[in-house]
Image: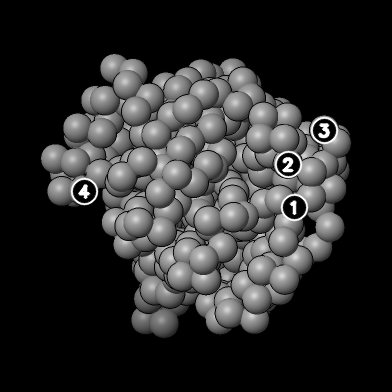
Amino acid sequence: MTTRTPVRTARLALTALAFAAALCGTAGAQGTGKLKVGLMLPYSGTYTALGVAIENGFKLYVDEQGGKLAGREIEYFKVDDESDPAKATDNVNKLIKRDNVDVIVGTVHSGVAMAMAKAAKESGTVLIVPNAGADAVTGPMCAPNIFRSSFSNWQPAYAMGEVAAKQQGKKKVMTITWKYAAGEESVNGFKEGFEKNGGKVDKQLTLPFPNVEFQALLTEIAAAKPDAVYAFFAGGGAVKFVKDYQAAGLNKTIPLYGPGFLTDGTLDAQGESAQGMLTTLHYADGLNTPRDNAFRTAYAKSFKLQPDVYAVQGYDAAQMLGVGLNATKGDISKKADFAAAVEKAKIDSPRGAFTVSKSHNPVQDIYLRKVDGKENKLVSTAIKGLADPARGCRM
Ligand code: BEZ
């Protein structure tokens, strides 16, 4: 027989409380209660507007479902990742370990996304990447709990390489980008598509992320006189680059190409300097489908601005989460069923319906667009149903 001291009684009470709390947690994980969504996005720095558009798009889809996915109310937890890879592991662990989120949605910057993918793989938390194109995320780092609603850096870049060589007849191209995974992979994808079709990339210029001191590099381009320049920049950096390119007079003789990030969400600020530019991307203005028109009207009504590709990717991240949760009756801990549902779904995206590959990256049409006023107007479909090669993914 044991006698109960006050200390022992208090301990028993605490154990009972902890058990009850654990039960509540389990009940949530098994498909009831609020679903905790961790948004890890840039809310400061050169990619701020991209982070905000992703969050807007995500919330728009959730709101359209009455604020719930698979019957579960959504509770948001937010972290500003500052597009800083050095802080990425600490930041993602705030969501995983401190806030104990059920799912992470993020981010924009490829270097930050790779740290997030590592943490997601280790903890088993579901991660949906709503922008960062790091090839590795759906390549060597691919995992059953990691998904992407956007693109791989290879996809739009490879398409632009084909367009530059086959359609535009360019032979010699210089490239310029920030020196980090997204820029380097984008240039590699362009080079692959361009050189396969008879072109030659003869010089690759870089500067550190997120520097915008382009002058010396623009002087180099002017001296080399390539047939065209391929550039990867986005957000605030893209605005500055396109304006500086025009101010240097280069756009008169050397066409500037890029993946659509160079002119998406940036045209208000780029104005005259971007007119006529050709880019490739998985979204365009003027798709004029009932699905896209409805999305654009709803987005404009909610946020008093036009959506861009980042808003679409956020919206589709929420759609993918909804697909997985519907299949598991809201129980995100059923990871295999969640993944199987996303893998066999057709995501009804404003960009056009897409499927998700075995490595969990969208298989999607890549459009050729031309800047006309404030729009990236659809010219044609550059490549239909383009899948990332997913090099190194073993799943
Ligand atoms: C990236 O880092 O992967 C990225 C950032 C902005 C636009 C596109 C890609």
Query: Can you tell which of label 3 and label 4 is closer to the viewer?
Result: 3
Three-letter residue code for mark 3 = Asn
359 or 279, nearer to the observer: 279
Q: Mark 4 or 2 closer to N-term?
A: 2
Q: Residue at x 76, y 66 (%)?
A: 224
SS at circle 1: strand
Judged left or right of residue 378, residue 148 is right
The mark found on residue 305 in the picture is: 4
Q: Mark number for residue 170?
A: 2
Q: Mark 3 or mark 2, which is nearer to you?
A: 2
The image quadrant that residue 349 belongs to is top left
Q: Position of residue 369 (x, y in %)?
A: 48, 35
Residue found at x 79% / y 43%: 171
In the rendered image of this protein, does residue 251 appear above or below residue 376? below
Q: Residue at x 46, y 38 (%)?
A: 370
Q: Are marks 3 and 4 in contact (CB under 8 Å)?
A: no
Graded by Cα atoms within 10 Å as few (under 14), some (14 to 19) or many (20 or more), the crowding at tag 4 reads few
Can you tell me whether the CB of the residue at mark 1 lies under 8 Å from the nearest atom of ligand 1? no
- Mark found first going from the N terminus, 1 or 4: 1
Dot in front, 1 or 4: 1
Residue under pointer 1: 173
Pinpoint residue 255: horizontal percent, then vertical percent.
59, 51
The residue sitting at 39% across, 34% down in the picture is: 377
Give the number of the disc on residue 197.
3
